[in-house]
Image (cartoon, rainbow, N blue to C red):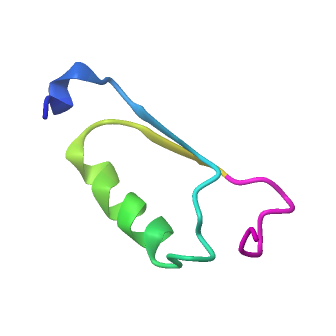
Amino acid sequence: MRPAAFSGYVIGSPAIWNEPELVTRVAAAKGLGEPIFVAVGANEGAPMG
């Protein structure tokens, strides 16, 4: 793994309903020095099936 290969991270449409603590974990990772952008659509509140 080469974390220095990236200057930032984009997390698009994460399954937050499946892992509610994801936002807290991403916020804690922010202290590692690289910017993180999380985007979630308005209708992404339920599991896909």
Residue 40 image offset from top left, x and y in percent: 70, 54
Q: Which residue is rendered at x = 65% and y = 51% of the image?
A: 13
Give how far across and how far down residue 15 sits, in percent: 59, 64
Side of 9 where 49 appears, left or right? right
Q: Is residue 44 left or right of residue 28?
A: right
| Residue 36 in the image: above or below residue 46 | above
The foreground one among 24 and 40 is 40
* Magenta segment includes 41: yes
Image coordinates of residue 18 in percent, x first then y, are 56, 76
Residue 34's place in the image compared with 14, above or below, is: above
Q: Residue furthest front?
A: 49
Which residue appears farthest toward the right when viewing the image?
43
Q: Quadrant of the N terminus?
A: top left
Tell me where residue 9 appears, x and y as whole percent: 42, 35
In front here: 12 or 28? 12
Residue at 40%, 59% in the rendered image: 26
Tally the marks.
Answer: 0
Q: Is residue 1 left or right of residue 12?
A: left
Q: Is residue 36 above or below residue 2?
A: below
Relative to 31, say whether 18 is above or below. Answer: below
Image point (31%, 36%), residue name: 34
Quick check: 43 left or right of 48? right
Residue depicted at x 40% and y 61%: 27
Q: Quadrant of residue 43?
A: bottom right
Q: Is residue 46 magenta?
A: yes
Farthest left residue in view: 1
The span picked out in magenta is: 40-49
Viewer-nearest residue: 1 or 48: 48
SS majority, magenta? loop
Which quadrant of the rendered structure holds the C terminus? bottom right
